[in-house]
Amino acid sequence: NKKKLTLRAGKTYKLKVKITPKNAVNKKVTYHSSNKKYATVSKKGVIKAKKAGKGKKVTITVKTTDGSKKKAKCKVKIK
């Protein structure tokens, strides 16, 4: 739901994923952080900014698991 996000160190944000079409059989996605030292993302899409990441930028990537290779990215700036 977001392409860019600013998050304070120690705070969290839940990503909202919209799967299309609405009647898709497999609606599962995976989440990946470009740098887990600065920000992590849970299996449910909750991003947590770490204190070590102050002033850093991390990219969170969301990928479909149905073989379509669709993905979305959210750039997170940590304050």
Image (tube, rainbow, N blue to C red):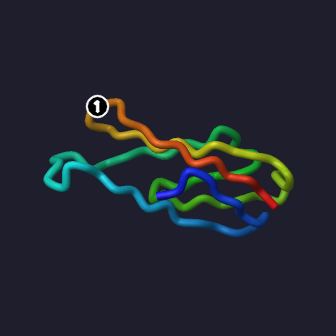
Name the residue beneath numbered marker 1. Answer: 68
Query: Going 54% across and 61% down the picture, which residue do you hit?
Result: 46
18 relative to 12 in the view: left or right: left
Residue 78 % position (x, y): 77, 57
Q: In this view, does 9 lie above or below 42?
A: below
Residue 31 % position (x, y): 49, 46
Query: Going 83% across and 59% down the picture, which residue do you hit?
Result: 51
Q: Check disc 1: other Cα within 10 Å, few if <14, some if 14-19, many if 20+.
A: few
Quadrant in the picture for residue 33: top right
Q: Is residue 46 above or below residue 20?
A: below
Residue found at the far bottom of this picture: 11
Residue 14 % position (x, y): 52, 65
Residue found at the far front of this picture: 3
> Identity of the amino acid at label 1?
Ser
21 relative to 48 in the view: left or right: left
Quadrant in the picture for residue 68: top left
In depth, the one of 1 and 45 nearer the eye is: 1
38 relative to 34 in the view: left or right: right
Element carrying mark 1: loop
Query: Going 31% across and 48% down the picture, which residue do you hit?
Result: 28
Q: In this view, does 62 lie above or below 42?
A: above
Query: Going 64% across and 52% down the picture, which residue do you hit?
Result: 40
**Quadrant of the snapshot with the C terminus:** bottom right
14 relative to 25 in the view: left or right: right
Residue 63 % position (x, y): 42, 40
